[in-house]
Image (cartoon, rainbow, N blue to C red):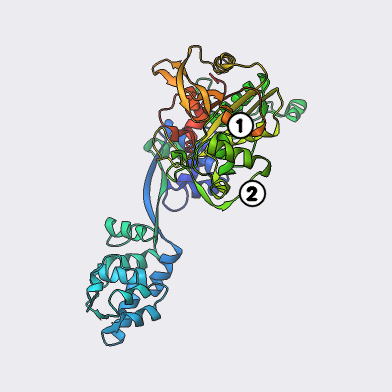
Amino acid sequence: MKNLTLNEAKTLKALLSGENSGEKIPEYLAKKVGIKVEALMQAAYLLEEKNLVDIDERVEEEYEPTEEGERYAKEGLPERNIHDFVVSKGGEVYLSDLREEFSGIINIGFGWLRRKNWVDCKSKICKLENQRFSNETDKKGGDFLVIALKAPIGRDEEILKELTKTRKNPPMLDKSTLKLLKGRKLLNIHDKKYIKIKLAEDGEEVARGIKVEDYEEITKITPEMIRERSWIGKRFRGYDAEVLSKEIYPAKKHPYRRIIEEIRDISLRMGFVEIKGEIIQSSFWDFDALFQPQDHPARDMQDTFYLNSESKLPERYVKEVKEMHIHGGKIDSSGWGGGWSEEVARRNVLRTHTTALTIRYLAEHPDPPVKAFCIGRVYRRESIDATHLPEFEQLEGVIMDKDVSFKDLLGYLKAFYKEMGFEEIRFRPGYFPYTEPSVEPDVYVDGLGWVELGGAGVFRKEVTEPFGINYPVLAWGLGVSRLAMLKLGLRDLRELYRPDIDWLRKSPLFGDF
């Protein structure tokens, strides 16, 4: 049979030789032929297409005790050791003695003793489920007597010991027991693929007639071969033009990263300066500087990640911000009334929005013109579902100049969204604590209709006045992850962060973003 490659011919001959003639595993054949296992399997699959070999592939579960499981297999489970100790003391032992003898394993061991019904005890406290034994036990009813009952060797003990000898299908295979051992972190279960290559009926006949030297072939022409004409009279490996080449997945950036970079590029081209800042911010910059009252729901623990640390307050702004909150400062505002606590303002949080960075930047650059943006991760105490995560990226932009107006804000937003590929844009009135007037931009998406994509407005004077900012400030924020979902056609926000290699490979290198 002349349409075989050299590796195919060698594989057929290797299947005939040695023990288990006609059936071998890939590792043995690869060593026999003198090639890598991957090359051997390529030859085997080609032979299977020619009906010369059969490839038997199966997946089996393998069981591997953890380090803790190995130790318990040798030394015994915690409950077994405690039970044996009670038996060695005449079958009755006080709990205080067990705590002293087995301080490292008494909690888990005693729990399993009760679950397996290996002990009884003379105290009502023993009936409490999930009892953790500590000094609190004495406060709840004093010491009590532990009495040993019968404790036959269980399947978990037998299987755990057997698995230290063999990883495959332990005797008395019991799925529930294996699951129990895995749940106790005493066992790892994983799948292993086994492959056997067998000569088919036609393959055996072909293999017996093969002379390997007849299949010596040139697989690659080199400049030396051409110069020396050594290729003349040699056999070349055949090339099937109808066989599809192996799909290649070039290295590329994550789709979400490419969208973030596109947003950055658009913002820079529109004349904005990028700013960055720390994830950890004081409540002063995250809330107080934006005229959010200290009893505002957004500060509640349900929305904000508070840290067990504080930051120094910027002394040059504290007095003005405090007065603005209490009575409206020097402008026509009544403020929020009541008190204002520096202690509350010093508390650190994981920033809940990137506005904490832009207001700080404006405070440091109070003279116009200012055009700045920030793309950063923010954190909120959200329940995880298809549209919410506790951390996500946000785009923040601000413009401060002498004669800018709300109309300019709408123009900038429209230009930005058009650059992002959205042709139909509309604006609805909105409400945000630190802007007035406020607006919510919507974009039209085929199949979804109108989708809200962020919020915007003009900073209130209560926000800008304490920092000496005397001109209008246009501001907007955009949830980048929601935008990415629309651009990538995703229905679940979590898909942006899952390590799905197949999706990452097949996402377009160049597309609508």
Marks 1 and 2, the one that precedes in the sequence: 2
Q: What is the tally of numbered marks visible in this picture?
A: 2
Q: Please state which of residues 191 and 136 is positioned toward the viewer in this rendering.
A: 136
Query: Circle 1 sits on which residue?
Result: 330
Can residue 144 be seen from the camera position used here?
A: yes
Name the residue located 46 percent from the left edge and 64 percent from the top edge: 67
User: Mark 1 and 2 residues: CB-CB less than 8 Å, in contact?
Assistant: no
Q: Amino acid at mark 2?
A: Lys
Q: Amino acid at mark 1?
A: Lys
CA gap, disc 1 and disc 2:
25 Å
**Residue 312 - label:** 2
Can residue 1 be seen from the camera position used here?
A: no
Q: Please state which of residues 392 and 221 is positioned toward the viewer in this rendering.
A: 392
Give residue 165's quadrant in the image. bottom left
Residue 253 location in percent, x, y?
59, 31
Give residue 72's quadrant in the image. bottom left
Q: Please state which of residues 319 and 149 is positioned toward the viewer in this rendering.
A: 319
Residue 163 vertical position relative to residue 267 in the rendered view, above or below: below
Residue 333 vertical position relative to residue 200 in the rendered view, above or below: above
**Mark 1 element type:** loop
Q: Left or right: 428 with respect to 175?
A: right
**Residue 354 - label:** none
**Mark 2 element type:** loop
Name the residue located 59 percent from the left edge and 36 percent from the top edge: 356
Residue 185 vertical position relative to residue 469 in the rendered view, above or below: below
Residue 272 location in percent, x, y?
67, 23
Q: Left or right: 277 with respect to 15?
A: right
